[in-house]
Amino acid sequence: MDWNTINSFESLSEALDKSYLQNIIIFKHSTTCSISHMAKMRLESDWNLDEIPTYYLDIKQFRKLSDSISETLEIHHESPQILLIRNGQCTYDASHFDISVEEINETIVWHKTQKFASDMQ
């Protein structure tokens, strides 16, 4: 995985802006939590969606950014937490051991199917 770091409100805004062009992933990580460390390792070893930009947020160092994400996307804060964002909206989120590359991929495929169906109308 090629992580882009979210370390300022500007970098968060740039990531959310990019979600209007393509799906993005934000991974909220606690560097002091063993579960978060394991979830990150599992995510990195299973990752096969290289076309999706991935963003990493250290919630211990940048808690205000984490709070802003929760508020902006209207989601409950968790850590570790993975967010799939499309058009500025969170379309999938999971935390702890529920984080799954397979489920992220299924969500992306579902969105493509929905877009194709709406384009056909």
Image (cartoon, grey):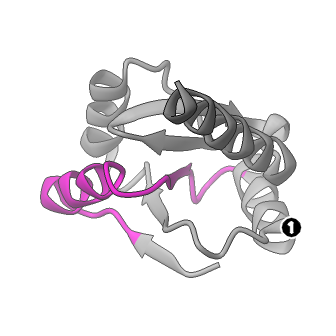
Magenta stretch: includes residue 22: yes
Please report the residue visible at 61 percent of the width from the left and 55 percent of the height from the top: 32
Task: Residue at 38% x, 70% y: name it.
Answer: 5
| In-front residue for pair 3/91 | 91
Point out the image quarter for the N terminus.
bottom right
Q: Would you call the spot at circle 1 few (<14 residues within 10 Å), some (14-19), or many (20 or more)?
A: few
As drawn, the residue found furthest toward the bottom would be: 2
Image vertical order of residue 119 relative to residue 74, above or below: below
State the residue position of label 1: 46
Residue visible at 44% across and 41% down in the picture: 86
Position in image of residue 37 (x %, y %): 73, 60
Residue type highlighted by circle 1: Asp
Residue 92 at what x, y percent from top left?
A: 61, 32
Residue 74 lies left or right of residue 121; in this view the side is left
Q: Which residues are magenta?
A: 5-33
Q: Position of residue 119 (x, y in %)?
A: 50, 35
Q: Is residue 14 left or right of residue 53?
A: left
Tell me the residue at 81%/41% (across/down): 103
Residue 57 counted in the magenta span: no
